[in-house]
Amino acid sequence: MTARAATPRPTTRARASGPARAGSVHAARLRRLASALAAHDCDWVLVTNPLDVAYLTGFLGGDSYLLAGQRERVIISDFRYEEELVPVRALARVHIRREPMVRAVAGLLADRSIRRVAIQAETVTLASRDALAEAAGAGVTLVPVRDLVAPLRAVKDETEVRAIRAAARIQEQALLAVLPTIRPGQTELEVAARIEAEMKTRGSSAPGFETIVAARANGSLPHYRPHKVKLAANRPLLIDWGAVVDGYHSDMTRTFSLGRWPAPIREIYDVVLDAHRAAAAALAPGRTTREIDAIARGYISRHGYAERFGHGLGHGLGFNAHEEPFLSHIAAATTLREGMVVTIEPGIYLPGVGGVRLEDDYLITARGAENLCSLPLDAGWATL
């Protein structure tokens, strides 16, 4: 799926699944957070992004904050999660609040005589910041800090990669179960519903995002939302779908034709496929996200479709369907590191005709990259 804004949407926390799990992996992450925090001249940070709380503690429930210092951590939650948080007590004190979150945080700051605390600039709204400042009083300084946890999350450990692999397998199996049933006359919504149901029966806690099923000319809209539009013979069908396992996302796109390929779509299919393969082959530690984007973008441009590929080439995968790093011509360049998981998803979009996007997920390895997906990319396989 093409990259949206990095900030998680309010519904993101509902995509996580499973009980809280605390262990050495989370303790190590908390130690890395403490080291990163020291660079900002702060001894404490208030982690308000629910996905960052999940990453640092293993608690996937949401609606909870983490107040983390150099030697002490407190999860601030409520009665709904009291039992679910029991495993996390090995990592942090659990404070079950019986007052509004702002007052609970202010009370904990006062109890610990905290005078300077970092807050996540990406996720704390102006209204929340002002309310916390008022509740905490003039003696407390709130320090907006960016990119405190995101860089930690960008490189995946074995546990994270295992979950993404599992999500990719589930989404592939789901699509393979649905493909033989696809017929002209079915609606986009019908196909999307069947894919999502097949993923859930196989263990995906939720769709990784709103499944895109774009029939006919609707494929020219990169973030199309399915409607009651009916699939048609000898017309294209773009499907962009993803699964979630233990909170971790996978993300793939394939473009099909229900019978004979329309000539313009068949032409751009080969261009997109070659651009995908060239960019994927170049993935390696030390390369930058802009370099990889330029490989695919340059190929598409040389074939005359520069204006029809406007989004970034790819994005990171993890607790967010879209997170650091972003492979884009308009985002800051990031150096790829071993353990990052990114998508490669070039596309060409022809208004009134349709579009082609081909997307797989890649793990950056010591010598290059490993494709975590196994479905074919060629047009022969994609002819239904």
Image (cartoon, rainbow, N blue to C red):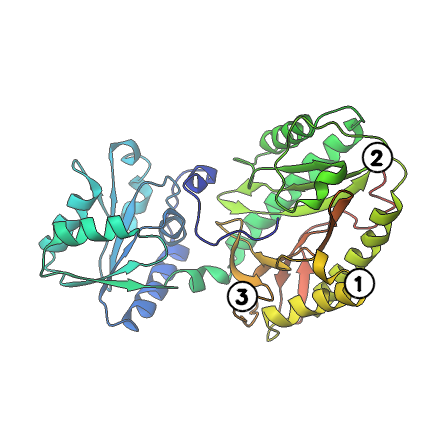
State yes or no: discs 1 and 3 in contact (Cβ < 8 Å).
no
Give the image quarter of residue 223. top right
Q: Is residue 62 or residue 186 the one in the foreground?
A: 186
The answer to whether residue 52 is above or below residue 223 is: below
State the CA–CA distance, disc 1 to disc 2.
Answer: 26 Å
Judge the density around disc 3: few (<14), some (14-19), many (≥20) Cα neighbours within 10 Å.
few
Q: In the image, what residue occupies the spot 19% across and 45% down?
A: 102
Give the image quarter of residue 76. top left
State the CA–CA distance, disc 2 to disc 3.
Answer: 36 Å
Given the current orientation, which residue lies at the most extreme top position? Answer: 185
Upstream in sequence: badge 1 or badge 3: 1
State the CA–CA distance, disc 1 to disc 3.
Answer: 23 Å
* Residue ID for mark 3: 331
Secondary structure category for the residue under label 3: loop
Residue 169: give x, y in percent of width and height.
Answer: 66, 43
Residue 180: give x, y in percent of width and height.
Answer: 80, 30
Tell me, yes or no, if residue 74 can be seen here: no
Residue 285: give x, y in percent of width and height.
Answer: 60, 72
The answer to whether residue 161 is above or below residue 9 is: below
Upstream in sequence: badge 1 or badge 2: 2
Upstream in sequence: badge 2 or badge 3: 2
Q: Is residue 144 or residue 93 the one in the foreground?
A: 144
Disc nearest the viewer among 1 and 2: 1
The amino acid pointed to by label 3 is Ala
The amino acid pointed to by label 2 is Leu
* Residue ID for mark 2: 258
The answer to whether residue 30 is above or below residue 227 is: below
The amino acid pointed to by label 1 is Gly
